[in-house]
Image (cartoon, grey):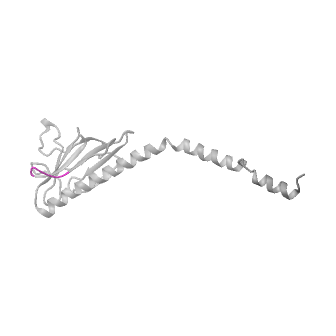
Amino acid sequence: MLMSGDYRSDVLANNKGFTLLELTIVISITILFIYFTPVFPRIFDRQKLYFTASVMAEDIRLAQQLNINQDAVYTIIFDCQNDRYFIQRNVYTHKKTDLPGGIDLVTTNFDFDNNTGNGCDNKLRFNTEGEPFRINGFLYGGHVTLRNQNGEFLYVIVASVTGRVRVDKQPPL
């Protein structure tokens, strides 16, 4: 025969199951994880797009400052087919940046040579005052369009007169 003290210690020693509360918590966490799992890749793609646009805006500002401080000619050339851009001084590449996978350099409207017959030449150049200009001397800004795998767009915009560089979700007017 078992005594009451032995029975109690025997029951506590053989406690190998889960309580209803533990089971409910585990199932709830599993359901939440399954529900939010498809959202994570979209969030990462959106952050990658914002990061890429921010780095590009900083590189444009870098070229602008190099033109101001060194009284030199730095040009940014956007290669839309290969999703990359270059900062060049004369014919020498100062910096080359490849966009991360899943981010497309869709288009630019920079036309340095101001020749509408050959389309946009995707070149951005600043004068020694930091203003974007064309070969004929007119101050003219523009924008770069970036897209991620989910079809979300961001625009890196260079203002015409001031040369202010910003990132926006809306295309410029």
80 or 17, which is in the foreground? Answer: 17
Which residue does the image show at 19% across and 57% down from the upper left? 64
Which residue does the image show at 89% across and 56% down from the upper left? 3
Residue 45 magenta-highlighted: no
Q: Residue furthest right?
A: 1
Which residue does the image show at 65% across and 49% down from the upper left? 25
Q: Main secondary structure of the magenta part?
A: strand
Q: Residue furthest front?
A: 1
5 or 56, which is in the foreground? Answer: 5
How many marks do you count on the picture?
0
Q: Residue furthest bottom?
A: 69
| Residue 151 x, y percent position in the rendering | 37, 39
Residue 107 position by quadrant = top left
Q: Residue furthest top?
A: 117
- Determine whether, in the image, residue 19 is placed left or right of residue 99: right
Which residue does the image show at 30% across and 44% down from the upper left? 146
| Residue 155 x, y percent position in the rendering | 30, 47
- Determine whether, in the image, residue 120 is placed left or right of residue 149: left
The span shown in magenta is: 90-95
Does 112 sit above or below residue 4? above
| Residue 4 x, y percent position in the rendering | 88, 57
7 or 137, which is in the foreground? Answer: 7
